[in-house]
């Protein structure tokens, strides 16, 4: 199941909110973040690896752009469709 924008926002907020400062260094625990996510969204099935990867991408996007949404694409089609093949032949 794919994560929605709401899920990603909750993940980033929970990640930073549950950070602990130890010896002057902030420690962020993905396991604790995942536990809070499961409490908030009990009907959403998720495995640790998928959660960690999505969290890492969302954190990177948030740090770079201030948003958890994906960057816009180039507009290039991902697959060859019959319409595109016809345009190429002309």
Image (cartoon, grey):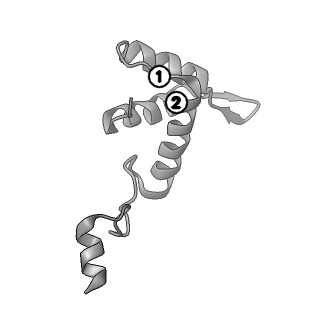
Q: Position of residue 45 (x, y in %)?
A: 42, 18
As drawn, the residue found furthest toward the right would be 23
- Which quarter of the rendering shows the C terminus? bottom left
As drawn, the residue found furthest toward the bottom would be 90
Q: Position of residue 14 (x, y in %)?
A: 47, 28
Residue depicted at 53% across the width and 22% down the height? 47
Q: Position of residue 32 (x, y in %)?
A: 57, 19
Placement of 33 over or under 90, stated as above or below: above
Residue depicted at 38% across the width and 61% down the height? 78
Q: How many marks?
A: 2
Element at badge 2? helix
Residue depicted at 52% across the width and 45% down the height? 57
Give the alpha-carbon distance from disc 1 to disc 2, as whole Å: 7 Å
Where residue 11 sits, quadrant-wise, is top left
Nearer the observer, 66 or 45: 45
Residue 34 falls left or right of residue 72: right
Residue 64 falls left or right of residue 2: right
* Residue designated by label 2: 51
Placement of 9 over or under 90, stated as above or below: above
* Res. 54 mark: none
Nearer the observer, 56 or 15: 56
Residue 25 falls left or right of residue 45: right
Mark 1 or 2, nearer chain start: 1
State if disc 2 and disc 1 touch (CB < 8 Å). Answer: yes
Where residue 77 sits, quadrant-wise, is bottom left
Q: Position of residue 85 (x, y in %)?
A: 30, 73
* Res. 46 mark: 1
Nearer the observer, 66 or 77: 77
Q: Residues within 10 Å of mark 2 (few under 14, many from 20)?
A: some
Element at badge 1? loop
- Which quarter of the rendering shows the N terminus? top left
Q: Residues within 10 Å of mark 1 (few under 14, many from 20)?
A: some
């Amino acid at each position: 199941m794919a994560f929605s924008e709401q899920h990603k926002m909750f993940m980033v907020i929970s990640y930073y909110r549950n950070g602990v400062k130890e010896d002057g260094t902030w420690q962020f625990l993905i396991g604790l973040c995942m536990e809070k996510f499961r409490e908030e969204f009990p009907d959403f099935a998720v495995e640790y690896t998928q959660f960690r990867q999505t969290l890492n991408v969302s954190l990177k996007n948030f740090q770079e752009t201030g948003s958890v949404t994906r960057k816009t694409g180039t507009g290039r089609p991902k697959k060859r469709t019959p319409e595109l093949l016809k345009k190429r032949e002309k």
